[in-house]
Amino acid sequence: MKNNINKIRKEKGFTQVELANACGVSRQTINAIENDKYDPSLTLAFQLAHCLGLTVDQLFLYEMRGDVKE
């Protein structure tokens, strides 16, 4: 899932370590999320949004897959 966490984190003046500590995860987890290598749980997505002062939909871009029927 695409996200804007790296950009927003830097704009807000957080390091990966600071954001990770605020959310109770490792710096490696933040790095993996920022590099689209790991999709966070819903709980972590809300924690990230809260720590950055935004909503989940401001941080993450959901892309529909072709095999999903509407």
Image (tube, helix red, strand yellow):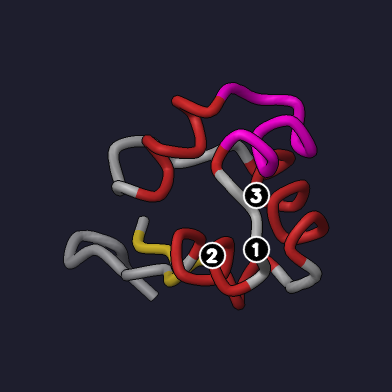
Label 3 or label 1, whichever comes before in sequence order: 1
Q: Nearer the viewer, residue 43 or 8?
A: 8
Q: Which residue is mark 2?
A: 10
Magenta region? 17-26
Q: Position of residue 19 (x, y in %)?
A: 67, 43
Secondary structure mostly seen in magenta is helix
Left or right placement of residue 48 versus residue 35 in this view: right
User: What kind of element bears circle 2?
Assistant: helix
Residue 37 location, x and y as percent?
A: 29, 38
Q: Residue at x 43, y 64 (%)?
A: 3
Find out whether residue 23 is within the magenta segment. yes
| Type of amino acid at the residue the image marks with label 1 | Gly
The residue furthest left is 66
Cβ–Cβ under 8 Å for marks 2 and 1: yes
Judge from the rendering whether residue 24 lies leftward or rightward of residue 38; answer left or right: right
Q: CA separation, marks 2 and 3?
A: 17 Å
The spot of residue 70 in percent (x, y) is 39, 75
Q: Which mark is residue 50?
A: none
From the viewer's perspective, tell me whether residue 24 is left or right of residue 3: right
Residue 36, above or below 53:
above
Above or below, 65 against 27 in this view is below
Occupied quadrant, residue 50:
bottom right
Residue sitting at x 77%, y 47%:
47
Query: Circle 1 sits on which residue?
Result: 13
Which circle marks residue 45 in the picture? 3
Q: Residue at x 80, y 69 (%)?
A: 53
Quarter of the image for residue 56 reads bottom right
Within 10 Å of the Cα at label 3, are there few (<14), some (14-19), or many (20+) other Cα atoms?
some
